[in-house]
Image (tube, rainbow, N blue to C red):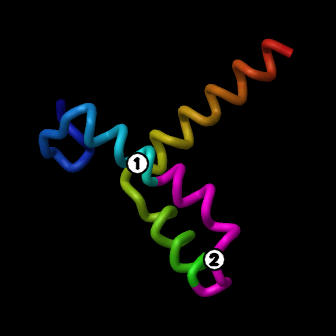
Amino acid sequence: MQDGAGGTEGEGGRKQDIGDILQQIMTITDQSLDEAQARKHALNCHRMKPALFNVLCEIKEKTAAAV
């Protein structure tokens, strides 16, 4: 499967990337301000951010529709 940069990547790599992003989001409150800002910058620059954002938006829409 092709990723956005033109390289070949398996499903396991994507799942790990998304898992890493989610773990970083969950632990950001336990960090100092400088650490949190550095982590926020890394998350904003991550290549999987748009895909994760789209998935979270879909979850939000489906959850709102189910209520």
Q: Mark 2 or mark 1: which comes first in sequence? A: 2
Measured from the top left, where is residue 40 in percent x and y? 56, 69
Count of all numbered marks drawn on residues in the image:
2
Q: Quick one: 67 or 57, which is closer to the camera?
A: 67
In percent of width and height, residue 39 lies at 52, 72
Which residue is identified by label 1? 48
Q: How crowded is mark 1: few (under 14 residues within 10 Å), some or many (20 or more)?
A: some
44, above or below 22, in the image: below
Whether residue 27 is in magenta: the answer is yes
Question: Dots 2 and 1: beta carbons under 8 Å?
Answer: no
Could you tell me which residue is drawn at 21 percent across and 50 percent down?
5
Say which residue appears at 61% left-offset and 76% top-offset.
36
Tag 2: residue type?
Answer: Gln
The C terminus: image quadrant: top right
- Identified at 46% across, 69% down, the residue is 42
Q: Residue furthest right?
A: 67
Q: Give the range drawn in magenta.
A: 21-34
Q: Name the residue under label 2.
A: 31
What kind of element bears circle 2? Answer: loop
Is label 2 or label 1 in front? 2
Q: Residue 19 carries which label?
A: none
Secondary structure found at label 1: loop
Type of residue at label 1? Met
Residue at figure coordinates x 47%, y 50% from the top left: 49
